[in-house]
Image (cartoon, helix red, strand yellow):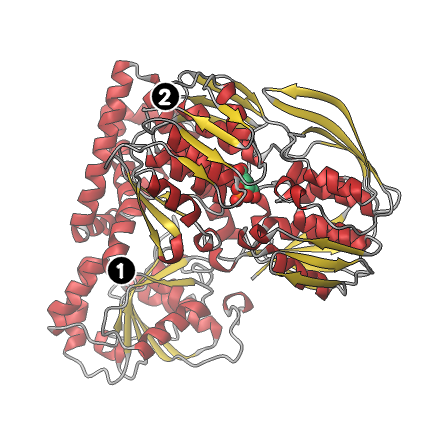
Amino acid sequence: MSQSIIGSSSAPPTIGRLAVIGLGLIGGSFAKGLRESGCCREVVGCDPDPQTQQLAVSLGVVDRMAADIADAVRGADLILLAVPVLAMESVLRQLAALDLGSAVITDTGSTKTAVVEAVRQAYGRVPPRFVPGHPIAGSERSGVEAADAGLFRRHKVILTPLEDTDQAALAVVRRAWQLLDADVEDMPLADHDEVLAATSHLPHLLAFSLVDTLASRSENLEIFRYAAGGFRDFTRIAASDPVMWRDVFLANRDAVLRSLDTFTRDLSRLRAAVEEGDANTLLGVFTRARSAREHFSKILARRAYMEPMQTQSINFIASPGGTVQGRIRVPGDKSISHRSIMLGSLAEGVTEVEGFLEGEDSLATLQAFRDMGVVIEGPHRGRVTINGVGLHGLQAPPGPIYLGNSGTSMRLLAGLLAGQKFTSELTGDASLSKRPMGRVADPLRQMGASIDTAEGGRPPLVIKGGESRLKGMDYQMPMASAQVKSCLLLAGLYAEGATSVTEPAPTRDHTERMLRGFGYPVKVEGSRVTVEPGHKLTACRIDVPADISSAAFFMVAASIAEGSDLTLEHVGINPTRVGVINILRAMGADITLSNEREVGGEPVADIRVRYAPLKGIEIPEDQVPLAIDEFPVLFIAAACAEGRTVLRGAEELRVKESDRIQVMADGLQQLGIKAEPTPDGIIIEGGVMGGATVDSHMDHRIAMSFAVASLRATADIRITDCVHVGTSFPGFIDLARSVGMNLRQEASA
Ligand code: S3P
């Protein structure tokens, strides 16, 4: 018995008698796998081919071969139909004439509408114990001799139950595939056929067609002697079984035609671009395709080597001790990276960005602009080239714009999109879908925008562009938010008359600085910022400084670990972002700045941090917006300080990627620190931290903060759900280890 295919099942359940009709690669692999699992009383096969009949027994694929279908299914508990789709109907007609008792029937056909139609033809209805299924797996080899008990391992199997499919029957089929370690998913029938037409049938058609075109035009097939890897990779699937594929195209005609029409239209567009020498369109298609392919490769890599996506999760294990030494540069500033893409896209000319943060949040913004027709090259080692389309050059995106975890992308884009002529929809992941968007939707509506939100002002946002021209307004912001301010200023570029925003306390001013850098006038009078329409943005160069919010983890690390001496290079020290330096210094930290200079309108410096004993303080409220993203790690500094630290006026922390007050208080308490959350802040008593398992609540900054805490903990800290660290700080683990932290990651289910 092969252990590898039993999967995670505990008590081996009994499928009873399994009958497999059609012993090709798929049917044979299913039979062999379940037979080896030991969960079947008997595996009976049926196939018209005499050689297959012999091999199936000698290769151990089945216990015995039946003489005909009636013989095969007699007394069966589960029947798998693994014959070609067009042969399905005649098999089903034979089954319909038999009394199958309570046997469950399933199939492996790759076009579900056609199979279900065949069932209907044979039975006059679809019996509730028929469960349509399709394993997405294959091999270049075919026939029973290729049967492989592990073929479906980590592969998707899609079940397409109908409304009245029997739930117990569905469970039996699901269980059988799970015993083969397949990743089973349910999907509506029509969706299945549409998805498969696009992702499988169309590529096969193209591969067959290309090889045929080349072959029939090349005498003696000589041309293939010059074909290199590209041709081989692209046409590999043209070696598939012609009869099977003929049947697939006949069976899934309508969905394939829809896919083919879309493709033909896009191909004609590319043809025209080649003919007209339209370099921009070519580059646009190629860069968008490349980034989609890279994303797809990641999904594939995860599926093949790690857990399936839904269950994949990363934990950090941070071990105690260590000092922090060296000179490092942390990745680029997240806020500035977002804005560089937005303004670069709206500018006239080509904007070159350096130091761009290749984190998932800023990449979400980049992808959003690609979706709106902007040709963006890179990122490659922090370099991005944006071929600006001008303030009025964005195009309607082909579908909803997915912004992942990124609140900044969603809020800033909301303002920008409110000024466009087209309608757009903004969506995000589970965390972003819980965050308040009323703070931007309400003032935008006051400017005349038409925006729908989900309940409670949450995403998705549907922004109906072009309904009426926005009108500028004078807005008193109720909370200190750079995102709200920036959103309204971007809307203001498209509004009639002036748009002013007054903030209750200073917040980061990257939008204002960068607008000016692109030559767009911005008036700042005290806490009031004003823009007027009618100007343009002119492309420029942007040098993104290292993100002080990412540097903050290392500033605290060096401050709390005895013997540490660390220099952080080229960090942005915009006065609206330096709260973390001010607060740490007030706690007694030893921080010196050197090499202060200005790059592209933003001040930067090298920051040296040496270990120093910290003491608790009352954090001045005016520092709160200036350190808003750094509080999770500042709480770690407070836990290591002598005495009490009190934070007030920071209720905004409750609506970040997680409720950062509650989540940090919970984690600190688990480490043995007295941490009392209050409605707008927290009170932390410095003490000794032990080890524990701490939940990051999928919040990148919480995860990294507890990793830093380990420098002063007495035992391992295990931090769960750290997959989002890549949103703002790709490479965090490697960089942390390079300066002396004891950190590793584990993938978990
Ligand atoms: C940001 C502003 C801040 C900050 C966020 C980035 C920005 O949010 O927390 O990480 O780039 O404008 P709020 O404006 O909601 O405070």
Quick one: 157 or 468, which is closer to the camera?
Answer: 468
Query: Whole-percent x and y of residue 589?
Result: 82, 41
Tell me where residue 545 sits by quadrant.
top right
Give the residue type that dot 2 points to: Gly
The answer to whether mark 1 is within 8 Å of ligand 1 is: no
Q: Residue at x 30, y 80 (%)?
A: 76
Please indicate, yes or no, whether residue 505 appears anywhere in the rendered image: yes
Residue position for label 1: 109
Give the residue type that dot 1 points to: Gly
> Mark 1: which secondary structure?
loop
Q: Residue at x 44, y 68 (%)?
A: 178
Q: Residue at x 40, y 30 (%)?
A: 499
Q: Alpha-carbon neighbours of circle 2 within 10 Å: few (<14), some, or many (≥20)?
A: some
User: Is residue 366 shown left or right of residue 417?
Assistant: right
| On screen, residue 657 above or below 103 | above
User: Is residue 256 shown left or right of residue 493?
Assistant: left
Number of the front mark, 1 or 2: 2
Distance (Cα) linking label 1 and label 2:
50 Å
